[in-house]
Amino acid sequence: MSKTGFLHSSIGKKFVMGLTGLFLISFLVVHVGINACIFIPDNGETFNAAAHFMATNPVIRVMEIGLFAGLLLHIYQALILTLENKKARPIAYAKVNGAANSKWYSRSMGVLGSLLLLFLVVHLSHFWVDTKVAVFSGKADEHNTYVEMQEVFSHIWVVAIYLFGVGSLLFHLLHGFQSAFQTLGLNHKKYTPLIKKIGIWYSVIVCLLFALMPIVMFMRGMNN
């Protein structure tokens, strides 16, 4: 099978999904690490320094292009695979007990992915857009991302939206982490159970940190 043929096959598309999924999983470690600096009680000084570095460093900005390319490719492949699966099964099977063979979130990756996409749009509109405007207008040194976070998370309904988005991310990762390794053929009787455990711990820790951020910022705003 040619390379082009492989990438256009169902297996090839799933392979790309797994590869881009692992890439995005790696990015989340960096993202949560930078954002966790808000927990340091220095009025956002450390966080702003880290955010400024990530926004202005030329190497990071080039890598950001790759990140968005990987994200768009992941979304595109997910959409194509979902449409192909529906086309292959235009008539639903009669009364199949999916719960007997899989978790509900593993059967709901399309819905969870759609919710995450909507959440991502909200998240980018709150932080990424303003940061890029500041960078390209030459006002990056004046931009205070910490104060921006304080403003955004001063509204309880925004905090609720973020917690809902993080919840969607949690269940997406619980299935996606292990599934990415499986799709890439990294299955082994000895190591697969370990990968599953690491995936659970990774998903819980990363999402817990993400969930605590809006809560902490909201509580700090109430105490000021």
Image (tube, grey):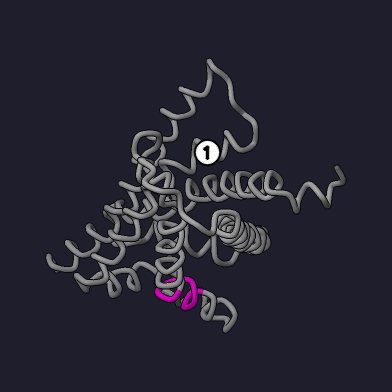
Give the overall secondary structure of the magenta segment.
helix
Viewer-nearest residue: 122 or 12: 12
Question: Height in image: 136 above or below 26?
Answer: below
| Circle 1 SS class | helix
Determine whether, in the image, residue 4 is placed left or right of residue 192.
Answer: right
Apparent side of residue 37 relative to residue 71 in the rendered image (left or right): left
- Residue at 59% x, 47% y: name it: 23
Q: Is residue 99 magenta?
A: no
Span of residues in magenta:
125-131
Q: Residue furthest right?
A: 2
Q: Which residue is mark 1?
A: 179
Looking at the image, which residue sits at the far bottom? 137
Residue 72: % across, % down: 61, 63
Pick the residue in front: 143 or 29.
29
The 10 Å Cα crowd at callout 1, few under 14, some 14 to 19, many 20 or more, is: many
Check if residue 128 falls in the magenta segment: yes
As drawn, the residue found furthest toward the left would be 223
Placement of 192 over or under 111, stated as above or below: above
Q: Amino acid at mark 1?
A: Ser
Q: Is residue 83 above or below residue 191?
A: below
In the image, residue 190 lies at what x, y percent?
A: 53, 15
Is 32 on the left or on the right of 132, as rendered? left
Q: Going 28% across and 59% down the picture, which residue do you hit?
A: 163
How far from the left and from the top, in percent, is residue 80? 62, 60
